[in-house]
Amino acid sequence: MGQIRRNRSLNHLSFSHHHLLLLLIFILGSAEAYKNYTVGDSLGWYDSLEKPGVDYQKWADGKTFNLGDFLIFNTDTNHSVVQTYNFTTYQICDYDDSLDADTKLWSTANPSNTATTPVTVPVPLLKEGTTYFFSSDYDGEQCENGQRFKIKVNHGKGLPESLKSPSEQAPAPNSADYNNEDSAPDIVVPSNFNKPRGNQSSDDDADRDGDDDNVKKESDAVSLFAKFLDRKFNGFMILLGVVCLS
């Protein structure tokens, strides 16, 4: 009977570890995926005069934003979407004196047009750090009436290729792909090529030293990756332990 109980405990332990590993993979994978955030959720992108009680900063504070994520602004042609990295521009709710390098107008508005139409404005997050958003219409009144918020953009997985600028996507001048449609494989020519056989001993030693250096570099890279996974797993186990104790 004791042996049966022991076997059942081992089977249960194996089952738990298996599902724990799957849960860990799911959590790590989910945390790194690119996300779309609808600004204001069902309230959309409007000032407090049209949507009383709207608080976009409160909406943003409960979320984590990374490079490559999108903010989706559901609004109409009577509201604009301004993104800036300049705190002064954000503070005064006016981008007239801003620079192209730090401010971008994603959607314009025409306050004189009474026949408004709905619009959806997708905005990708392309730069790490603090980013500000506001609507500048009616001389900044919409911004002053609550149509504004700031977020912090983390690195996450980094920008996907589709969102990188052409200069970031272009290969470096020393790359095998530079100005070459068909990339040629690397060809290593031995240092003793076309040399008498009697001179090969010192060259062979140099080649072996180079190979040892390459092996060491690869080993260091594997070690760093293993340490990264170990930290991730330890953090998850601590979190799991807190949940179980509570």
Image (cartoon, rainbow, N blue to C red):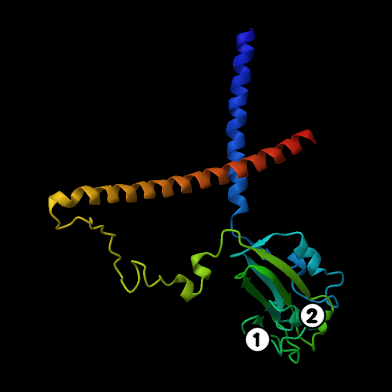
Which amino acid is tagged 2?
Gln
Q: Residue at x 84, y 78 (%)?
A: 145
Please tell me which residue is depicted at 62% across the width and 85% down the height of the picture. 100
From the image, which quarter does the C terminus lie in?
Answer: top right
Residue 135: image location, x then y, percent: 75, 80
Residue 56 placement, left or right of 85: right
Q: Position of residue 181 (x, y in %)?
A: 31, 70
Q: Quadrant of residue 95?
A: bottom right
41 over 214 or under it: above or below: below
Kind of residue sitting beneath label 1: Leu
Determine whether the residue tagged by mark 2 lies in a helix, strand or loop: helix
Q: Which label is found at residue 99?
A: 1
> Residue 232 location, x and y as percent?
61, 44
Residue that sits furthest to the left in the current view: 196
Q: Is residue 143 above or below residue 58?
A: below
- Furthest-top residue in this view: 1
Q: Mark 2 or 1 closer to N-term?
A: 2
Query: Which residue is at a point 36% across and 67% down the rendered structure image?
Result: 175
Between 110 and 235, the one lying in front of the other is: 235
Vertical placement of 204 versus 1: above or below?
A: below
Q: Nearer the viewer, residue 22 or 89?
A: 89
Residue that label 2 marks: 91
Quarter holding the N terminus is top right
